Image: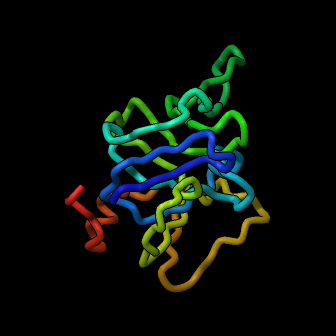
Amino acid sequence: MLLKGSCHCQSVNFEVESYTPYPFMRCYCSICRKTAGGGGYAINIMGQAETLKVNGMNHVQVYHAILGKDKHGKPKTSTGRRHFCKHCGSYLWIFDPSWKEWVYPFASAIDTPLPKPPERIHMMLDFAASWCEIPTGKNQIHFARYPEESIEEWHKRHGLYDEQV
């Protein structure tokens, strides 16, 4: 599926091919919660990095999340590169050189209508804000940290993996 996305001010537009386009996983870690907006979580989709095309890259800035401090008190940063618009602050995608073949657009930046997932995974709940309401009930699955299942495995299990990309 071709995903098209943009920032709020339209300075940046991008597209990427994805065979895992269902926005099913909500991450409540402090990095996602604080960088993605006011909902208390972020939703990332996986796309093929080699297909990422960006118009307006000169308007994009990169943030490396701070993971803590080393023994000398200096910040330790993530290898993940969180790309955002330097004008309006919209978060666009994450790229991590540890997984060079993938790019992870924020579902909130995607303009293409996305398919509705049959279930939702809520992960990193150990780090959720106390005010954040975590949905419960049918088709709501919870993890204190990371689930064992990958984005690709989840799509395959539900018969939603699109190998035509």
Hey, which residue is sitting farthest top in the picture? 72
- Name which residue lies at 46% across and 75% down: 116
Describe residue 163's horizontal placement relative to residue 81 as left or right. left
Task: Indicate the position of residue 161 as horizontal and vertical percent values.
Answer: 27, 64
Hey, which residue is sitting farthest left in the picture? 164
Task: Indicate the position of residue 86 as horizontal and vertical percent values.
Answer: 68, 33
Between 73 and 52, the one nearer to me in the picture: 52
Q: In the picture shown, does residue 118 fall above or below 17?
A: below
Q: In the picture shown, does residue 108 fall above or below 49?
A: below
Between 101 and 120, the one nearer to me in the picture: 101
- Name which residue lies at 58% across and 27% down: 58
**Quadrant (top left/top right/bottom left/bottom right) for the C terminus:** bottom left
Hey, which residue is sitting farthest right in the picture? 131
Describe residue 29's horizontal placement relative to residue 97 as left or right. right
Q: In the picture shown, does residue 118 fall above or below 70?
A: below
Task: Indicate the position of residue 55 as horizontal and vertical percent values.
Answer: 50, 37
Q: Is residue 64 visible?
A: no
- Name which residue lies at 72% across and 36% down: 87
Between 38 and 51, the one nearer to me in the picture: 51
Q: Is residue 8 visible?
A: yes
Residue 117: image quadrant is: bottom left
